[in-house]
Amino acid sequence: MLPRIDYQAIMPELIVAGTILVVLTLDLFLRQSRKHWSMWVSFAGVATALGFALSLIPWVAAREGGTGRVFGETYVLDGFALLFKIFFLAVALVILLISLRYIREGRYYQGEYYFLLLTSFLGMLTIVSSRDLLMLFISLELVSAPGFLMAGLRKRDPRSNEAALKFFLIGILSAAIMLYGMSLIYGVTGTLSLKGIAESLAVFNHPTFGGDFPEGLALAAVLFVVAGFAFKVSAVPFHFWAPDTYEGSPIPVAAFLSVASKAAGFAGLLQLMFVGFRPLAEAWAPIFAVLSILTMSIGNLVALQQRQVVRLLAYSSVAQAGYMLLPFALVGVTAALDRQAFAAAVLYILIYGVMNLGAFAVVTAVSRESPGVLIEDFAGLGQRSPTTAVAMGGFLISLAGIPPTAGFVGKLFIFLAAISAWQAGLTIGLWLAVVMVVNSVISLYYYAAVVRQMFLVPVDRPAPFRAPALVTGVVVLAMIGVLAVGIFPDLLATFPPGATLP
Amino acid sequence: MDWFDDWAITLAVFIPAVGALVVALLPKDRDRLIRGMGILLTGVPLVIGIVMLFGYDFDAPGAFGTADAANALQFRVDASWISAIGARYHVGLDGVSLPLFELTLLLSFLCMIYTWKYLPSPGKPKAFIALLLLLETGMAGTFVSFDLVLFFVFWELVLVPMYFLIGIWGGPNREYAAIKFFLYTLFGSVFMLLGFLAMYFRADPHTFDLIALQGADFARGFQLVVFAGLFLGFAIKVPMWPFHTWLPDAHTEAPTVGSVILAGVLLKMGTYGFVRIALPLLPDAAQVWAPWIGVLAVIAIVYAALACLAQRDIKRLIAFSSVGHMGFVMLGIATLTDIGINAAIFGMVAHGVITGMLFFLAGSVHERYHTREFAEIGGGMLQKVPYLGSVFAFTAIASLGLPGLAGFWGEVMALLSSYSPGAGLSIGLFRTLMVFGGIGTILTAGYMLWMIQRVNLGTVSETWKDKDLPDITAVEYVSWAPLLVGVLLLGVYPAMLFGVTGEAVGSLVGMF
């Protein structure tokens, strides 16, 4: 008998999938001068999907335990999944908007680009609902594979070729390692479902079990999976592809990789570690502590030396990934602390998405005038385009975590989780918090370097700079969001994603 | 006036911030309108602040120690803010915060008046005014916050506008000074934040409320660690020796009103933090740390005085003298006595008024001579611009602590209090500190008089003999008169301020 499927719950995915097909077909029939219509079709599709996703909020609330099961335990819709879906759809809208001019003027294959972009976003919509290893893997590859192609869209630029090739090779390598780890997990526990894995690991791990549990093997498997995800979220020492790839890609694609693709990786990792592998947390949490410290410190230190803004943002996003990895190091002390760390990580990922996307939107605009986007190219922007410059300054200050911006709120919640873990007996919590605050101060230096160029350095090109209206609109919206969350954190901080943890 | 009681602080704090947004939206070419808006938008909060003085109960105890300390807060507002962590919008005023709150409102207003005529290159009045307004919100908010997260947000809100004020309108070395200021202060304050968070989790129930945390009674070892974090944040802001190196750079490079605000208010945020947060929340640790703070304070006094003797630039000299004056304030705090802390608050206000005035003068001297080097000015200012010279001499003498002027009381009482420090502190050590502090006052007198000699006295040098230098202008009179009157009033009638702080400090000292 076929299971009864609740189509309402997967409406956003269905709409996006439909849009993908329409865009792909439509491109064949559009004249060259009208190719950019694909963007508006995509936009309409994603906006509709977003509307449906918003309408699902009461649907989720009405489900027992706040979790709607669509395909059994494999594919669910709960507060966590819905929150991320709304986030990803909103991000998709923004990326579409900032792509329009860039892709159109850069003589790219437009239909192809929008098709790939939407396909990747479809993967993101499914990854946040996946609750077993197989589904997670498929979704993650659905996110990554179009990314490889998009990174190489500047076909005549050798750096874009390099970006794509590097991204592709490392991407499939990490996928292979991850898949190997997953197969080992299946071998040890006999199940693919995250909940099932947690249950069987917990039983094995129990002292009364007798000791013939292949702990080493299970741990090795977990490490393989973690390494695979570490590539996706560009954690040190698996980060070296990111700056080259971001630099070589078209800038909207770099924005996409550093925000959406990274957030998708984290969403998957969150479910894996906080749910599936939690019983072994004692063994792997210290590894995340090391990963987190390395990632934020090295990311920040290398960012200090960058002269090109996209590379600077790339290393900054490596450092930011370090902050997001911190809560993972706090897992396993108490259930309450788990929920706190989980919520802190989710909050930070969302806030990071908004501020980083805003910064990339500005970079996209500037790149029209200075394709190299060196830091010096921002000189005098404060006078040439005050709105854009002030917003860019706001995003950078927010990335540095200075109040009253959303970035501060995000960091505050991570600090709170770390100090809370310290108080609960996890000494490393305090050290992680200390390393993170020192890193925040270091990071200010290179963010301020851009701010300095925009406002402190005299203008050598006095002509006003006009950012495209769409980009300006997006930037202003993101800025309002960053400030609103910074001043009234309750707008974002009260949602209960922690409740989706068992 | 119930309505006023509930809204007074909120309006006074946020009118400038909202005003900054309004100014930012004004058309760029309406120069007079923009500067006028600046005066209006700081004038309204000042009027609110003055009206509040009439409704203020000067006999009320401070918000320290006692179980119903919260009720001692006046114009109190306590509203939900970040519900997930229980941080609240809790603001109010007591005897310790009122003087600094009023000082902030006054100095901001006077700076706006000064800006009506004097705006350093490269102009851009819109951005200048908007940043000053934003700065006022941060400063005023810091002095009224009774929630640690709220305090931190206001504390940090100050950094960005000040960074731009120094970085855009500053002197030749402005970019270096601006980023140094930013990084230094940020470095200290993030450790302060960690200290706040640690207290939050140690308190039962978890809370960021300053009043509730006073009853938390933390374990001694914990207090010592947290105090270290808070110390780093506050001491850099004060700045205490050896964390002071950002200050001479920032002051020298900052535009005139930036220096005035920096010296007049920003430094006080650090000392205020000690009195408001570190002492009452961590009293045991304060007693352990007090001798060290005392020693650092006296090193600052002597070191700053010696450094001043080596300066060739008026502004740099005044900047170093600030380090010394803040040393007296910290010495007063370190004694943990009634007299000492009263002296500290008096010292803060007096320093704000006097040094704020000195920086105005340094700016005006630069405005006329286009240099601040003693050698290039070459003396004779009393002859060349007699009124300016007189005011300069008057303020410098006030700064050296002449009895009868405001600078005297803070210094002499800080020294007095270290003769008999609070219970548990080493009498021998503090009396030694008193002696060295005394030597510091002599050196202070020395360099101030020397400055007067080099700038004011003597004959006008060849360079300036035939130049036509204007004397004090109307705008300068208006923006300086309140400060000069303040210097005199506080000097001859110190009870005016001690009457405000006395009760609050009494309840604070009762905690030790």
Image (tube, rainbow, N blue to C red):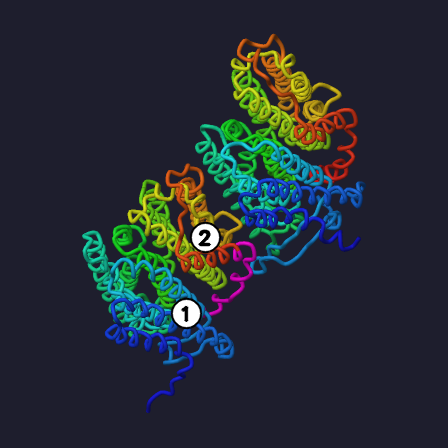
Note whether residue A333 is visible: no
Disc 2 packing (10 Å; few <14; some 14–19; many ≥20): some
Relative to the observer, which residue lies in front, A25 or A14?
A25
Chain of the residue on which disc 2 is drawn:
A
Q: Please determine whether, in this image, residue B165 is positioned above or below residue B459.
A: below
SS category of the residue bearing label 1: helix
Q: What's the residue type where badge 1 is placed? A: Lys
Q: Viewed as shown, does residue A236 lie left or right of B196?
A: left
Point 35% across, 72% down: residue:
A41
Write down the residue under mark 2.
A426
- Which residue is depicted at the point 53% across and 27% down? B241
Q: Chain of mark 1?
A: A
Total marks in image = 2
Within-10-Å neighbours for mark 1: few <14, some 14–19, many 20+: many
- Identify the secondary structure beneath mark 2: loop
Q: Which residues are magenta?
A: A484-502
Same subunit, labels 2 and 1: the answer reads yes
Q: Nearer the viewer, residue B208 or B82?
A: B82
Q: Nearer the viewer, mark 2 or mark 1?
A: 1
Tag 2 and tag 1, C-beta contact below 8 Å = no
Quadrant containing the C terminus of chain B is: top right
Q: Is residue A492 magenta?
A: yes
User: Where does label 1 land, which residue?
Assistant: A85
Q: Earlier in the sequence, mark 2 or mark 1?
A: 1
